[in-house]
Image: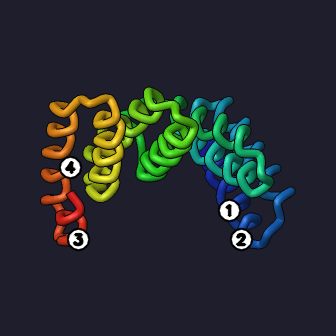
Amino acid sequence: FEKVMVDLLLRCAELARMDGDVQAQEAASQLALDTARGIVYVAGQRRALNLLARIALDMGDTADAQALLLEQLHTGREEADTREDVRTAMLLADIALQDSDHATAQTLYQRAARSSRRLQYWKRTVNALLNQVTIVRERNDRDAALALLYDAADAASQTDDLGLQAQV
């Protein structure tokens, strides 16, 4: 029953977001998170954390948003990542790269690449691999850059997107 309650609260939070009711969205998201934690409902926890992070971003609190998004990724196992988790890893990696934290960025891009490959989310796989190429090239690691480019070309070939294939 609690799992259904968490899903219902998350849906209410999404509807409140569409209506622009930040207070209701935050209250429903926080209650969903607390309930999901109580019953160890990992997917519910991840979705609630993501919603709370979006609220923080909307309020201009990027530090809180980053912490919530990192918690989202650390909740549960990587093998259970969804497309939303891949997008979260990519966003956090982009932020880390902007902050010149190349090690964190590469770790997050690697996770995004692994998870998106498992999900057959090929465009994100290519993007995550190409972003890693930029990082390893800055370290003058040509062998790693070449291996990543081959992986990106292989992922791009899984699609009919000629633009994506040409990008690699």
Tag in front: 2 or 4: 4
- Where's residue 34, x and y in %? 73, 36
Dot 2 corresponds to which residue? 18
Rounded to the nearest angstrom, the CA distance separating label 4 from label 3 is 13 Å
Q: Which residue is mark 1?
A: 14
Type of the residue with mark 1: Glu
- The quadrant of the picture occupied by the C terminus is bottom left
Mark 3 to mark 2 CA distance (whole Å) = 34 Å
Whole-number angstrom distance, CA of label 3 to CA of label 1: 34 Å
Mark sitting on residue 152 = 4
Secondary structure type for disc 2 = helix
- The residue closer to the viewer here, 65 or 22, is 65
Q: Is residue 110 left or right of residue 37?
A: left
User: Vertically, is 31 above or below 101?
Assistant: below
Which residue does the numbered mark 3 point to in the structure image? 163
Tell me the kind of residue under disc 2. Answer: Met
Residue at 32% x, 29% y: name it.
139
> Can the viewer see residue 131?
yes
Q: Earlier in the sequence, mark 3 or mark 2?
A: 2
